[in-house]
Every structure is written in structure tokens, then in C-alpha cells.
Image (cartoon, grey):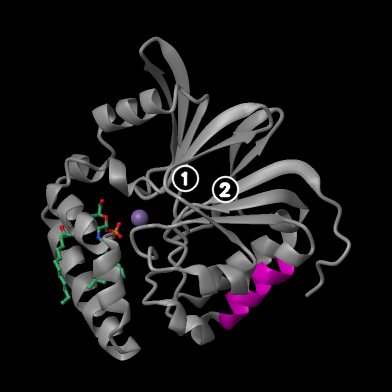
Amino acid sequence: MGYAGQEKTAFSLLISDLHLCDSRPAITAQFLGFLQQQASQAEALYILGDFFEYWAGDDDLAQHQPIIQALRALSEQGTQLYFMHGNRDFLIGKAFAAAAGLTLLPDPTLVTLYGKRALLSHGDALCTDDVAYQAFRRQVRAPAWQENFLQQPLNARKAQIEALRQRSEQEKSGKQESIMDVNAEAVAALLREYDYPELFIHGHTHRPALHPLEVDGRRVDRWVLGDWYEQGSCLVVDRQGVRNQQLP
Ligand code: LP5
Ligand code: MN
């Protein structure tokens, strides 16, 4: 890969909800181009979950080699790579992180970006009105459940994920849009807990926007990342601030 010797500029990129999978090769191609162009100049790239359409376990690395190798090449030439789990790829583990040269971050994580405190999250944990989803989430995020699930053969896991995907799509079609958005009280409580960071950045809802909030009289900019279904996009953060960039 042609990344060697690339100068870094003082900016960081954040992306989420690419939903990479074999059935949408154009998105993978756009992502690989994004790594070579924008991301190779950045100091850091934060991937805030649902990078893959789904992840069945780190014993499925072979299928995703082009993506893993491209991440690793970028990491080796000096862009810091960070990864936070989404609701579709929370089974990504240490083997994937090592192979791709990235650091796993817990959800949420507070970082400092060019002098501003920024709280990063995937966002699904804040959709507290989606009671059925939160019950499901508690179940599958339990370490004991995951250990048990990962002991099953890969093809058996994939069959269960397929069944879950169908059930999820069916249930979503019966849920109101507002139920599948973040809950304002849950957002405020989280921002209070983290002492009102200047920035709160998350994905998951696929509703890219800037929401300037006031929580207990304190200003917090909530930035929602876009998905990559129709077009790739990212947030660029530098000393000037934050902006959304649509990819060509
Ligand atoms: O992802 P998105 O935005 O489309 O939908 C989410 C919620 N759905 C999910 C499911 C994933 O999309 C699908 C695959 C994930 C793979 C994970 C791998 C390991 C787990 C394997 C478990 C078998 O996260 C959706 C939310 C939506 O966000 C908006 O916030 O509404 O939640 C649901 O639709 C979940 C249902 O409400 C509850 C499902 C109960 C399922 C019970 C177990 C079924 C097991 C089937 C297999 C035998
Ligand atoms: Mn998600």
C-alpha cells in the first residue's frame, strides 16, 4: 500500500455505521479510498461502531483481510486508529484489534481533541425508549453470554445472527421513529456524569446533524455521524472546530 512517509496534519476523523459487507462492495471500495486519501493525512481515525454489518467473532478474520490489511498499513505509517463497538460488531475482540493495528475503546470514552473535551459513544445505549432492544442488549453484552455464544461453531453463530437480523428488521418496522432515537434525558444524564464535555459525538441513529444542547446551563454540541449507505461521510475535528464532510 502506498502510505509510507505520509505527513500528518493536525486533524482527526470520526466515522461510524459503514455496515461493511460483501453484498455492498462499493462501500468497501469507498472506505479503502478514504483510508488512502483523507485518513492517511490524519493524526487519528476514530471508528465509532457498526463498522461491519455484523461480526460473528474474531475467528472470521479471513473473510475481511483486505479491510484489515488496509487498516494495519495505515496504523503502521502513523495514523492512530481507535475502534468502539457498535450494536452489530460488539463481538470484535483483541485478535481483530491486533491484526488491524487499532486500539479498542470502551463506550463511552472521553478524549481531548485539540483542546476540547469530546465524549465519544456508539449511541445505542442512549435509545432507552426502545425497551425491547435494551433488554436484548443487556443479554448479549453480558460476558457469560458472549463466552457461550463464541464457543459455538462459526456457521451456527452466523445462522443465529441471520435469524436475529430478520427479527430486528421486522420489529423495527413496527417501532415509532422517536423510539429509535436517543432519549433526551439519557443524553443529559450522561453529559452531566462526564461534567459537560464541549463535544458529544455518536452514531447509530443514522440521523446526521448538529444539535447544540444546553444541559444545566452548560453548552454541549451533540454531533451525530451519518451512515455510509448512500454516501460516505465523516466528521473532521481540528483546532478550528468540527465539520461534517461528505466524501466524493
Ligand atoms: O442495527 P439496527 O440499527 O438496524 O437495529 C438496532 C437494533 N437491532 C440490533 C440487531 C442487529 O441489527 C443485527 C445483528 C447484530 C449481530 C450481533 C452479533 C452477535 C449477536 C447474536 C445474537 C444471536 O441491534 C434494533 C433497534 C435499532 O437498532 C434502533 O435502536 O430497534 O433492535 C431490535 O430490533 C431488537 C428487538 O427489538 C429485540 C430482539 C430480541 C431478539 C431475541 C433473541 C433472538 C435470537 C434469534 C436467534 C436464535
Ligand atoms: Mn448501531
Q: Image point 59% across, 65% down: which residue?
A: 31
The structure residue drawn at horizontal position 77% and vertical position 58%, both measured from the top left corner, is: 78
Horizontal side, residue 141 vs residue 15: left or right: left
For mark 1, give the secondary structure.
Answer: loop
Placement of 247 over or under 149, stated as above or below: above
Residue 176 placed where, x, y %? 15, 45
> Residue 194: which quarter of the image?
top left
Q: Earlier in the sequence, mark 1 or mark 2?
A: 2
Quarter assignment of residue 167 = bottom left
In magenta, the rendered stretch is: 65-74
Of all residues, the one furthest to the top in this rendering is: 217
Residue 77 appears anywhere in the view: yes
**Percent x, y for residue 102?**
61, 62
- Frontmost residue, 29 versus 144: 144
Residue at the disc numbered 1:
225
Disc 1 beta carbon < 8 A from ligand 2?
no
**Residue 248 seen in the figure:** no
Q: Residues within 10 Å of mark 2 (few under 14, many from 20)?
A: many
Amino acid type at circle 1 is Leu
> Given the current orientation, which residue lies at the most extreme right position?
5
- Residue 191 is marked as none
